[in-house]
Amino acid sequence: MTETATRTAAAQPRSTRPSTPIWSRTWARIAGGFLLPILIIASWQFVTSTGLVPPYRLPGPWSVVEAGIDLAERGELWLHIAISVQRVLIGFAIGSAIALAFSAIVGLSRVGGVLFAPTLVALRAVPSLAWVPLLILWMQIGEESKVTLVAIGAFFPVYTTVADALRHVNPQLVEAGRTFGLRGWSLFRTVQLPAVVPSVVSGLRLGLAQAWLFLVAAELLGASMGLGWMLSDSQYTGRVDRILLAIVLLALLGTITNAILVLLEKAVLKRWM
């Protein structure tokens, strides 16, 4: 019996691990991410080089690169980038911190939800540009008004995502924690916080994306430096190449900052999950 079983097992094909889908591999994901931008640039070059679109409406890709080189050589490009990044990071940090505090109040307390949730829902519906005249009137045309507008933009995605997650934590987990004598901060740190960590990171990523949108609104009105100001100034001077340069830089900076948060997300999830 033993020899028969051994021969049968040897005759059977060895089990192999299921192959990883090609689009799940790192190299394929990186290559796929570059595919669409390459196609866009190739189409852009084609329509400009063949004359389908006149240069004064859409300069070629190399014209945009030359505009960036010109600004970099004069030291203006890096200053625009540094100022915009600084405004986004400061506003995002302030808005996210306040949002997390209100999320805890609204998500963990029924009284807090009754008092704050309706007002915050109403304020969330206010368009970004509606805040600009009021902030300029209160804070003048300075860094304070721009950073405040960016903070407002970062606040609502973080607040909404985290507050909803806290309100929908599995009640059975909370009750299980209370049966072990957990209350207050210990219950929050041990049970509720690990349950909402993915939502916190997702809210931060949404808040960061919104912060870049509100930055452009802040710099379009009442600014003298920054990528948003470059957009506005280039419109008045007819420099379409600089407009496209500012758009490309905003896209790249948004992608880079989001990638940083993705790395943070992996580290946080590894720690808490």
Image (cartoon, grey):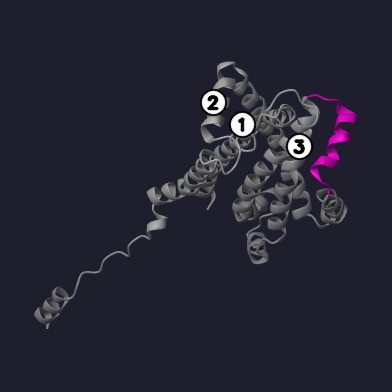
Q: Secondary structure at mark 3?
A: helix
User: Is residue 221 located in the magenta-colored stretch of the structure?
Assistant: no
**What residue would you read off at disc 2?**
66
**Which class describes the residues within 10 Å of circle 1: few (<14), some (14-19), or many (20+)?**
many
Task: Kindly identify the residue that appears in the image at 65 percent across and 63 percent down.
Answer: 179
Residue 38: % across, % down: 47, 44
Between the residue at mark 1 and the residue at mark 3, the CA separation in whole angstroms equals 20 Å
Q: Nearer the viewer, residue 146 or 32?
A: 32
Which tag is nearer the camera, tag 1 or tag 3?
1
Q: Earlier in the sequence, mark 1 or mark 3?
A: 3
Q: Nearer the viewer, mark 3 or mark 2?
A: 2
* Range drawn in magenta: 126-142
Q: Quadrant of residue 231?
A: top right
Numbered disc 1: secondary structure: helix
Amino acid identity at mark 3:
Ala
Badge 2 vs badge 1, beta-carbon distance below 8 Å: yes
